[in-house]
Image: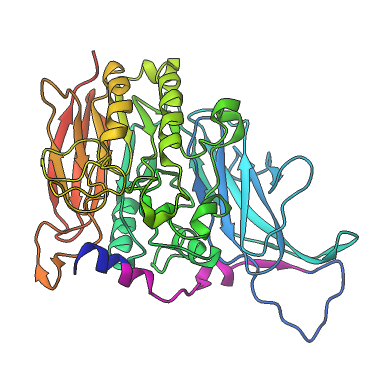
């Protein structure tokens, strides 16, 4: 199946949210306000929590609900939560009310520290600004834990990419990650196809059709959007399901850069960038409704400052992540700057195979900071570009979701990957796991920066 036909087919899959064991195990507390005794409300909490925006002093916790609700997290450093604090969703002025997704931002945490938490939600009867009441509270009985980022965290990450709502390869990736138990996972773009509804987004991130429904309840995730994660009316507001970086982690200048991250994890500094669309803003297909050019330029200023932060600059290893590759040695591959509509007889296809514009802006800064490795995605085929004298950083391109065939033909180079990175014996060891064969595809090593 050709790449475009594959994505079109995947986008047409039916949307179905399965409640699963999480909701079945939920504890329902008798409401203070009597409700209709003949009615039996469905479970309110319909997903395990998802840890979003892994960081040193904050974390995002999101989960799905089935009805109008106000959610909360009880979090503390003691396993019995005797020191637990209750943090509600929303900001200072009002708490949030949602009938789809609850998002709780937890701040003021200590770096490299383990925390325990539970989630809960209040069912809300809302009839207007002067007519609202809590009619029941539901708590997930499961106790979860996670460890924040920081200089003393375990230097161990995994990367997945181009999952495209394909449950078989995604399930295999999650099973592999569950066995590896990294400190965090970087989802390197194209989790989506073209999503028009928040229900579709909720299914992708919070209620995926896989066995491990609590896949992100204890292993935190970072997210680098891909071009498909921008497409569709719902994806224009992805923050309703996958929250932005915490406000205190961004300056006023960078307020709209909620997807970028610069996180210290043990001996590794993790840098997240968003390459945006794989078509130019001038391409008539998108009617001038994208602004990737300005977005990339704003990220350049952010990157320059982020790389100067003490905890980032002093990390022995610097690894950057973005969806579209920043290098390609095939002279015929479209570099993403073919104005005005991405077409030129010398290049193929009619979208960016790599991002020359981003490479010109970002790689000089990364080189100056002694970045050893950039991990990318987008091309649906695993390959490794070793560093050279003129390009001192290496590039890994993760594999796509195709399971060993393309367009009805066997393709052994088409397989999904989990890219694992871990510092052992003062060296960064990269292991590329082939999820089609179940074997290790490649092993690489990197020395600390000088």
Give the x, y percent position of residue 91: 72, 42
Q: Residue at x 54, y 38 (%)?
A: 245
Q: Which quadrant of the rendered structure holds the C terminus?
A: top left
Q: Residue at x 44, y 52 (%)?
A: 230
Give the x, y percent position of residue 59: 55, 40
User: Looking at this view, is 271 or 302 the one in front?
Assistant: 302
Q: Which quadrant of the rendered structure holds the N terminus?
A: bottom left
Number of numbered labels in the structure image:
0
Residue at the top extreme, as displayed: 450
Residue at the bottom extreme, as displayed: 38
User: Looking at this view, is 376 or 148 the one in front?
Assistant: 376
User: Looking at this view, is 241 or 275 the one in front?
Assistant: 275
Residue 262 visible (yes or no): no
Q: Quadrant of residue 293?
A: top left
Q: Residue at x 22, y 56 (%)?
A: 416
Magenta span contains residue 204: no
Give the x, y percent position of residue 174: 34, 57
Give the x, y percent position of residue 151: 42, 23
Q: Is residue 89 above or below residue 57?
A: below
Side (left or right) of 132 relative to 172: right
Side (left or right) of 25 relative to 356: right
Q: Is residue 97 above or below residue 386?
A: below
Side (left or right) of 24 relative to 193: right
Q: Residue at x 54, y 42 (%)?
A: 244
Per the rendered image, the range of residues in magenta is: 8-29
Side (left or right) of 266 relative to 345: right
Q: Is residue 430 above or below residue 285?
A: above
Magenta span contains residue 20: yes
């Amino acid at each position: 199946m050709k790449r475009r036909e594959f994505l079109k087919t995947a986008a047409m899959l039916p949307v179905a949210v399965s409640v699963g064991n999480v909701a079945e195990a939920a504890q329902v507390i008798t409401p203070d306000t009597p409700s209709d005794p003949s009615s039996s409300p469905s479970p309110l909490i319909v997903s395990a929590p998802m840890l979003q925006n892994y960081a040193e002093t904050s974390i995002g916790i999101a989960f799905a609900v089935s009805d109008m609700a106000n959610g909360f997290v009880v979090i503390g450093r003691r396993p019995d939560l005797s020191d637990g604090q209750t943090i509600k969703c929303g900001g200072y002025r009002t708490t949030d009310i949602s009938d789809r997704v609850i998002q709780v931002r937890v701040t003021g945490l200590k770096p490299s520290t383990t925390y325990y938490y539970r989630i809960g939600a209040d069912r809300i009867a809302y009839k207007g600004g002067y007519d609202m009441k809590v009619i029941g509270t539901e708590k997930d009985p499961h106790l979860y834990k996670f460890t924040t980022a920081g200089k003393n965290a375990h230097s161990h990450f995994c990367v997945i990419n181009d999952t495209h709502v394909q449950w078989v390869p995604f399930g295999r990736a999650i099973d592999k990650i569950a066995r590896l138990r990294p400190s965090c996972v970087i989802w390197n773009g194209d989790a989506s196809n073209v999503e028009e509804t928040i229900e579709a987004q909720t299914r992708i991130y919070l209620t995926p059709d896989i066995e491990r429904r609590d896949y992100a309840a204890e292993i935190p995730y970072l997210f680098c959007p891909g071009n498909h994660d921008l497409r569709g009316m719902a994806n224009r507001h992805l923050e309703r399901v996958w929250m932005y970086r915490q406000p205190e982690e961004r300056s006023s200048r960078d307020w709209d850069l909620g997807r970028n991250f610069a996180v210290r994890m043990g001996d590794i500094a993790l840098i997240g960038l968003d390459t945006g669309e794989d078509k130019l803003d001038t391409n008539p297909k998108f009617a001038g409704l994208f602004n990737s050019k300005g977005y990339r330029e704003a990220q350049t200023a952010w990157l320059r400052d982020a790389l100067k932060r003490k905890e980032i600059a002093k990390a022995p290893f610097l690894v950057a992540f973005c969806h579209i590759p920043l290098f390609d040695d095939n002279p015929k591959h479209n570099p993403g700057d073919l104005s005005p509509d991405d077409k030129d007889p010398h290049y193929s296809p009619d979208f960016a195979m790599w991002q020359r514009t981003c490479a010109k802006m970002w790689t000089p800064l990364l080189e100056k900071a002694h970045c050893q490795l950039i991990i990318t995605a987008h091309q649906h085929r695993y390959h490794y570009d070793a560093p050279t004298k003129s390009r001192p950083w290496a590039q890994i391109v993760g594999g796509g979701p195709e399971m060993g065939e393309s367009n009805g033909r066997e393709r052994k180079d088409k397989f999904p990957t989990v890219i694992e990175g871990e510092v052992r014996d003062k060296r960064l060891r990269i292991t590329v796991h082939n999820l089609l064969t179940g074997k290790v595809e490649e092993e690489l090593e990197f020395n600390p920066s000088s």
